[in-house]
C-alpha cells in the first residue's frame, strides 16, 4: 500500500465516521432480533445446558 492510498483510506474512514456512518451501522445491527430475545429463550437455554 502506498502512502497516498493509505492516507486516502484513512480520510475516507474519517469522513464516514464523522458523517455518522458508524452510528447508523450500529443502530441497524443492534435492531436485529435474535433468538435470545424470544420469550421462551431462558427456558430453551436451560434445556440445552442440561444436554
Image: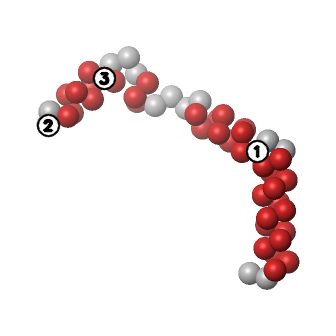
The percent coordinates of residue 51 (x first, y second) are 14, 37
Q: Nearer the viewer, residue 6 or 28?
A: 6
The percent coordinates of residue 31 (x first, y second) are 59, 30
Mark 2 Cα shell of 10 Å, populated few (<14), some (14-19), many (≥20): few
Residue occupied by mark 3: 42
Q: Which mark is residue 21?
A: 1
The percent coordinates of residue 10 (x first, y second) are 79, 64
Residue 7 found in image quarter: bottom right
**Above/below status of 51 relative to 4:** above
Q: Secondary structure at mark 1?
A: helix
Q: Residue at x 20, y 34 (%)?
A: 49
Which comes before the other along the chain, label 3 or label 2? Answer: 3
Q: Residue at x 55, y 32 (%)?
A: 32
Q: Which mark is residue 51?
A: 2
User: Is 25 left, or right, of 18 in this rendering?
Assistant: left
Q: Which mark is residue 2?
A: none
Asked if the residue under mark 1 is in contact with the one under mark 3, i.e. CB atoms within 8 Å, the reply is: no
- Real-space CA distance between mark 2 and mark 1, rounded to the nearest whole angstrom: 42 Å
User: Is 34 left, or right, of 10 in this rendering?
Assistant: left
Asked if the residue under mark 1 is in contact with the one under mark 2, i.e. CB atoms within 8 Å, the reply is: no
Which comes before the other along the chain, label 2 or label 1? Answer: 1
**Above/below status of 11 relative to 44:** below
Q: Secondary structure at mark 2?
A: loop
Amino acid at each position: 500500500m502506498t502512502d497516498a492510498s493509505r492516507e486516502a483510506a484513512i480520510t475516507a474512514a474519517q469522513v464516514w465516521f464523522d458523517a455518522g456512518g458508524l452510528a447508523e451501522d450500529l443502530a441497524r445491527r443492534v435492531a436485529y432480533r435474535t433468538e435470545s430475545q424470544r420469550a421462551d429463550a431462558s427456558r430453551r437455554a436451560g434445556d440445552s445446558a442440561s444436554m
